[in-house]
Amino acid sequence: MATEVAADALGGEWKGHVVRISGGNNKQAPKQRLGEKPRTKAPNIQHLLTPRVLQHKRRRIALKKQHTKKNKEEAAEYAKLLAKRMKEAKEKRQEQIAKRRRLSSLRASTSKSESSQK
């Protein structure tokens, strides 16, 4: 882990000396956290877990699940609609390109026939 370096660059008095650079790899040391510690405050009384409290908790969780399910279904429906619209737009664009090609080929053929008649 240590690196040995010649100390000639430090000056004439260090000429011929070899210095070992080590450290900086102490992975067992605790992490240093900068700044102020967060202040936590505990409640003075503990809340009682009555059947009513548990029922409210169950309802909250059930509502969360319902909303998640609804959002997933709506997202799937929207993705389907988006795919359909993209497909329609692509087909429309292809039709326009084909129409343009058809018109340009007609123009080219009519101009060739006119030039050959002259």
Image (cartoon, rainbow, N blue to C red):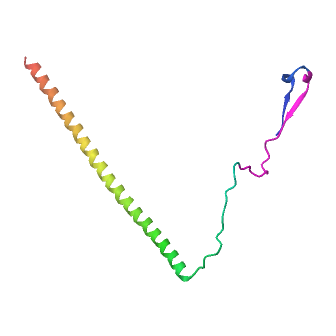
Q: State the predominant SS element of the stretch in magenta.
A: loop
Q: Residue furthest left?
A: 117
How far across and how far down the image is residue 64, in percent? 47, 68
Residue located 79% across and 42% down the image: 24
How far across and how far down the image is residue 60, in percent? 49, 72
Closest to the observer: 97 or 18? 18
Residue located 86% across and 34% down the image: 20
Taking 10 as reference, is 60 above or below it? Answer: below
How far across and how far down the image is residue 74, in percent? 37, 61
- How many numbered discs? 0
Give the quadrant of the N terminus.
top right
- Judge from the rendering whether residue 57 lies leftward or rightward of residue 115; answer left or right: right
Residue located 69% across and 52% down the image: 36
Q: What stretch is highlighted in magenta?
A: 13-33
Taking 26 as reference, is 53 above or below it? Answer: below
Reply yes or no: does residue 18 show up in magenta.
yes
Closest to the observer: 8 or 31? 31
Q: Which residue lies furthest to the front in this view?
A: 44
How far across and how far down the image is residue 86, in percent? 31, 48
Quadrant hosting residue 114: top left
Residue located 41% across and 62% down the image: 71
Closest to the observer: 51 or 94? 51
Reply yes or no: does residue 74 show up in magenta.
no
Give the quadrant of the C terminus.
top left
